[in-house]
Amino acid sequence: MIQIKDLNYRYPDGTLALDGVDLSIEKGEFVALIGKNGCGKTTLVRHLNALLAPTSGFVSVFGMDTTDTSNVWNIRQTVGMVFQNPQTQFVGTTLEEDVAFGPENLALPQNEIRERVDRSLREVDLLEYRTHAPKALSGGQMQRAAIAGVLAMEPQCIVLDEVTSMLDPGSRRKVLDTIAQLHHSGKTIIYVTQRIEEILPLADKIVSMNNGKIEFIGTPQEYLASVKSPIPAITDLMRKLKAKGFDVKDDVFTVDDALLEITQAIQARDKSKTETSGNG
Ligand SMILES: Nc1ncnc2c1ncn2[C@@H]1O[C@H](COP(=O)(O)OP(=O)(O)OP(=O)(O)O)[C@@H](O)[C@H]1O
Ligand SMILES: [Mg+2]
């Protein structure tokens, strides 16, 4: 659904932020875009709904060329964006007013708007906060409210740019669960993050950028098999255990899988000990 070919982008001050980017994203895919500060992640995703136009190269969304101004309206309805600071995106005085803003601009009938607002707030588990002021919500609730605002436009694809970076672990979990649900319901997800550990269990595809270029594209397993860093702390621990002679897999990235591996390794070791002492 998204095709990017030899994309270059230079900011007006001369900074070359994207340098020959090629990437295709399929409908329904969950793509994690990772990489260090300033490597070009935000610049890249801003091309996906025509907030930026290529200096050279080509971006198309569902066959629509992003540089054709007559496509911009359709592209923005197809690709919704959520950014790091949701405060800057709120326009309504209550949550429901805020979420209604997008559908109202589509000039939909009132009952359709009502339905979309309710459905979107329910999907992010904020229906009970409908009459609250967006600015009075907690950080995690604000991010979910911003996601509801995007959902009300019923986009096929949702881009989230470092939306959990300011959140505590509990709120982060809740936002990630919401995004995982949206993926299961068929949405295409493009998730920008610097936290590799939060994304490996969710993503279909990891895209790693460095200095304006893509340096790796592959599955989470392929990422761990070929990339030395960054890796999740739990994977690092498993690699260290393996190096110390424990018979554990070193490509696991969830605590549950790690626990299972370690438990099995300990049981196997205890068993071989009893067997050895039994024989002696
Ligand atoms: N408005 C701008 N004008 C000039 N240069 C910019 C502008 N915005 C970003 N840049 C530069 O373009 C490069 C890519 O920046 P970008 O914000 O896309 O990176 P990023 O990977 O999203 O970084 P971060 O992890 O910090 O969000 C950096 O060198 C950055 O300094
Ligand atoms: Mg960024």
Image (cartoon, rainbow, N blue to C red):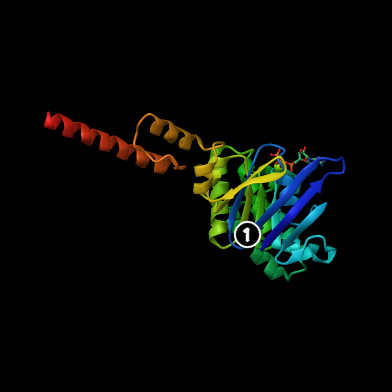
Of residues 200 and 5, the one drawn nearer to the viewer in this rendering: 5
Q: Is residue 157 above or below residue 137?
A: below
Image point (54%, 54%), residue name: 204
Q: Is residue 236 above or below residue 75?
A: above
Residue 237, position as x, y percentages in the image:
44, 33
Q: Where in the image, quadrant-wise, is ligand 2 located? A: top right
Residue 4, position as x, y percentages in the image:
71, 57
State the quadrant of the C terminus.
top left
Describe residue 80's horizontal placement relative to residue 234 as left or right.
Answer: right
Of residues 102 and 263, the one drawn nearer to the viewer in this rendering: 263
Q: Is residue 48 visible?
A: no
Q: Is residue 69 above or below residue 141?
A: below
Please identify the quarter of the rendering in which residue 72 is found. Answer: bottom right
Residue 100, position as x, y percentages in the image:
72, 60
Disc 1 secondary structure class? helix
Please identify the quarter of the rendering in which residue 211 is found. Answer: top right
Image point (55%, 62%), residue name: 185
Q: Is residue 137 above or below residue 239?
A: below
State the quadrant of the N terminus.
bottom right
The three-letter amino acid code for the residue at tag 1 is: Ser
Of residues 24 and 175, the one drawn nearer to the viewer in this rendering: 24
Q: Which residue is mark 1?
A: 120
Of residues 273 and 130, the one drawn nearer to the viewer in this rendering: 273
* Mark 1 crowd level (few <14, some 14–19, many ≥20, 10 Å Cα): many
